[in-house]
Image (cartoon, rainbow, N blue to C red):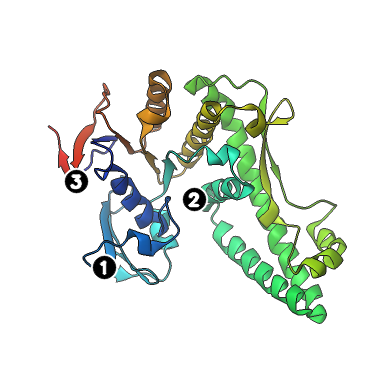
């Protein structure tokens, strides 16, 4: 399909395949779906693999041809005809923000959802993030193995490496959350979301004057449990209204609205970079009432990003846009 550069509206019956179009974009960018972590579930019955291809037009630079082939266990990525060693190379060229029916878990779900929200945003605005995150993850895995196997002699050296990477990662995350917090009040006003006295704050996942001291203080407990219990992997994006967690006071509808505010804030932050993200709004009209649906769509459109929105009925929009009807897995442009 040849999408519009600003807004693409896809409509059709339930099960027609609308979300699969958005899912293809997510898989091409991230290497995995937002619906499942199992790539094998995305492979159809005709072949042992699936493939996704796209051309990315960059107003400030050259166009690029992106491709990804996946099976249950293996993947192959290509950029301008050259094989890639890391999916992150595709991700950098195709940043995106996804709002879908389970996005309320960003508010009501486990801290892991919120850590991923922070890290996904940082990946595109902090050049050193991926290197530091990998260093921390590798050291954490090694320390946990040492704890389970009782390798006490290596814990001191591992603690230093883990503390160094964890401190850097925590500082990056805190700075990113502060950037999000600086935009969120304006976005709440723009979206008309009635959430007074709401604050978001980064909690690093450890206490004390330094992460190294926290690791030392918790070593005996960690040895008993066979795992590292303090650090960025336990961090939280705290969301409170008058010092009460919003997940305990917001209704499901309010959780969806606040999640939309957070995601649109991320769009605003990422839009400050040279590479604008795609904004994918899956089944928008069924998640919000007409007023909120219009507000979210207008906010996404005004960001200057390319927006993709799906629904069972055709949404009307006054600005330039493309319309596509999806039926039984086939996409046809509506003139």
Residue 65 percent coordinates (x, y): 26, 59
Local secondary structure at mark 1: loop
Do we see residue 183 in this rendering?
Answer: yes
Residue at image position (53%, 20%) is 189
Horizontal side of 46 relative to 210 (left or right) equals left
From the image, which quarter does the C terminus lie in?
top left
The residue sitting at the left extreme is 335
Q: Within 10 Å of the Cα at label 1, are there few (<14), some (14-19), or many (20+) other Cα atoms?
A: few
Horizontal side of 45 relative to 92 (left or right) equals left
Residue at image position (38%, 51%) is 26
Q: Which residue is mark 1?
A: 81
Q: Which residue is mark 3?
A: 328
Residue 230 percent coordinates (x, y): 76, 57
Q: CA distance from mark 3 to mark 1?
A: 31 Å
Q: CA distance from mark 2 to mark 1?
A: 24 Å
Label 3 vs 2, first from the N-terminus: 2
Discs 2, 1 touching: Cβ within 8 Å = no
Give above or below for 233 relative to 6. below
Residue 241 percent coordinates (x, y): 68, 27
Q: Within 10 Å of the Cα at label 2, are there few (<14), some (14-19), or many (20+) other Cα atoms?
A: many
Label 3 vs 1, first from the N-terminus: 1
Label 2 vs 1, first from the N-terminus: 1
Q: Which residue is mark 2?
A: 124
Local secondary structure at mark 2: helix
Give above or below for 220 relative to 12. below
Horizontal side of 292 relative to 77 (left or right) equals right
Disc number lying in front (3 or 1)? 3
Residue at image position (57%, 63%) is 131
Local secondary structure at mark 3: loop
């Amino acid at each position: 399909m040849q999408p519009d550069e600003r807004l693409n509206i896809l409509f059709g019956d339930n099960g027609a395949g609308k979300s699969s179009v958005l899912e293809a974009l997510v898989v091409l960018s991230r290497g995995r779906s937002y619906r499942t972590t199992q790539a094998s579930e995305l492979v159809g019955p005709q072949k042992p693999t699936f493939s996704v291809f796209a051309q990315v037009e960059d107003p400030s630079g050259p166009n690029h041809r992106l491709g990804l082939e996946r099976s249950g266990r293996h993947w192959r990525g290509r950029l301008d005809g050259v094989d890639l060693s890391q999916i992150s190379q595709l991700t950098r060229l195709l940043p995106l923000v996804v709002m879908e029916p389970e996005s309320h878990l960003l508010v009501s779900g486990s801290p892991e959802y919120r850590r991923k929200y922070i890290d996904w945003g940082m990946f595109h605005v902090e050049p050193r993030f991926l290197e530091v995150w990998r260093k921390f993850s590798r050291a954490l895995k090694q320390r946990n193995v040492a704890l389970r196997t009782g390798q006490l002699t290596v814990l001191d050296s591992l603690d230093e490496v883990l503390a160094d990477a964890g401190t850097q990662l925590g500082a990056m995350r805190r700075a990113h959350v502060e950037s999000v917090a600086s935009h969120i009040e304006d976005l709440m006003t723009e979206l008309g979301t009635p959430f007074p006295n709401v604050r978001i704050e980064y909690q690093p996942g450890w206490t004390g004057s330094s992460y190294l001291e926290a690791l030392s203080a918790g070593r005996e407990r960690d040895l008993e449990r066979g795992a590292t219990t303090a650090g960025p992997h336990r961090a939280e994006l705290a969301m409170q209204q008058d010092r009460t967690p919003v997940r305990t006071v917001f209704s499901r509808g309010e959780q969806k609205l606040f999640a939309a505010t957070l995601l649109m804030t991320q769009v605003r932050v990422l839009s400050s970079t040279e590479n604008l993200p795609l904004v994918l709004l899956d089944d928008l009209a069924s998640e919000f009432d007409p007023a909120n649906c219009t507000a979210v769509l207008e906010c996404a459109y005004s960001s200057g990003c390319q927006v993709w929105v799906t629904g069972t009925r055709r949404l009307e929009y006054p600005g330039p846009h493309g319309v596509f009807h999806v039926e039984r897995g086939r996409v046809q442009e509506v003139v």
